[in-house]
Image (cartoon, rainbow, N blue to C red):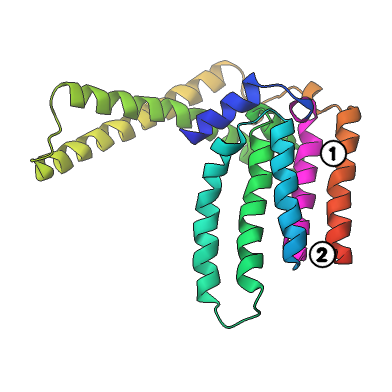
């Protein structure tokens, strides 16, 4: 699962980008995406693409494996480009570069930042109810996914699925899905009771120690501002 893989990269690897505050990385992401949206220069966007690949490599991330995720925005960017045939000659290339470069910037941040720290940043700008809901939903996603995977494996071990019994497979798939929905509802109730027992009053308190800035962060701030300035000036 790609989400679990990104969590593994954020928690188990170490680099200057991992050690930076999530605040600087989120600000960098906003500035980088703004630069990507503003720029209409294919050369500049290609340079950003190479830069983000370099940052991934310097952050000890598996560049080739993460690049496979770029196939998704590449596909949808290609479809959008084909739907706008007849506009400027450089439009398809700029569209594709925008799609994959923006996705690359997001992957760089997600693969180097603990998700708990990301939600701590969200608490600064979002109402507590919204940020807490997103945090609990993200945490519960893996629990429900594991339950669904275990249920499917049990069904397979008992010979529930066969290539020659399509309708029977569909009926059993409906039962597996129903079981997963019931388990998701039970997980929701259990989480709610646990929060109440632990004194939840409408806000999950997160540690702010990870939000402290260091010398790494000023470099990231400067890089993000530089990218935006170059895009506004029209370099490329």
Outermost residue, bottom direction? Answer: 86
Residue 118 screen position, x and y as percent: 69, 34
Tell me if mark 2 has few (under 14), some (14-19) or many (20+) residues whose alpha carbon lies within 10 angstroms of its own. some
Q: Quadrant of the N terminus?
A: top left
Left or right: 101 as drawn, with respect to 17: left
157 left or right of 191?
A: left
Is residue 201 something one can see in this rendering? no
What residue is rendered at 68% in x and 39% in y? 108
Dot 1: within a 10 Å radius of its alpha carbon, few (fewer than 14), some, or many (20 or more) residues? many
Q: Comparing marks 1 and 2, which lies closer to the viewer?
A: 2
Q: In terms of depth relative to the viewer, which is nearer, 42 or 16? A: 42
**Count of numbered circles on the image:** 2
Against 49, residue 183 (above or below) is: above
Outermost residue toward the top in this view = 198
Q: Is residue 30 magenta?
A: yes
Image point 87% across, 58% down: which residue?
A: 230
* Residue shown at the point (61%, 26%) measured from the top left: 9
Residue 228 marker: none
N-terminal-most mark, 1 or 2: 1
Q: Which residues are magenta?
A: 17-39
Please say whether residue 132 is visible from this viewpoint. Answer: yes
Image point 86% across, 44% down: which residue? 223
Report which residue position mark 2 lands on: 236
- Pointer 1 residue: 220
Q: Say if 121 sits above or below 19 in the image.
A: below
């Amino acid at each position: 699962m790609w989400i679990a893989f990104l969590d593994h990269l954020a928690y188990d690897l170490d680099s200057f980008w991992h050690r930076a505050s999530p605040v600087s990385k989120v600000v960098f992401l906003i500035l980088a995406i703004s630069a990507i949206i503003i720029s209409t220069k294919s050369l500049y966007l290609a340079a950003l693409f190479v830069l983000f690949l370099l940052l991934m490599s310097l952050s000890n991330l598996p560049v080739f494996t993460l690049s496979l995720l770029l196939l998704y925005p590449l596909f949808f960017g290609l479809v959008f480009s084909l739907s706008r045939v007849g506009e400027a000659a450089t439009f398809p290339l700029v569209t594709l570069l925008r799609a994959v470069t923006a996705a690359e910037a997001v992957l760089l941040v997600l693969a180097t930042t603990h998700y708990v720290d990301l939600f701590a940043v969200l608490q600064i700008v979002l109402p507590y109810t919204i940020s807490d809901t997103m945090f609990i939903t993200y945490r519960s996603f893996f629990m429900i996914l594991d339950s669904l995977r275990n249920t499917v494996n049990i069904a397979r071990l008992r010979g529930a699925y066969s290539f020659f019994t399509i309708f029977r497979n569909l009926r059993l798939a409906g039962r597996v899905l129903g079981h997963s929905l019931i388990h998701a509802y039970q997980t929701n109730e259990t989480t709610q009771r646990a929060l109440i027992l632990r004194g939840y009053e409408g806000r999950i308190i997160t540690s702010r120690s990870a939000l402290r800035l260091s010398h790494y962060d000023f470099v990231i701030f400067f890089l993000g501002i530089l990218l935006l300035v170059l895009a506004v000036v029209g370099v490329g």
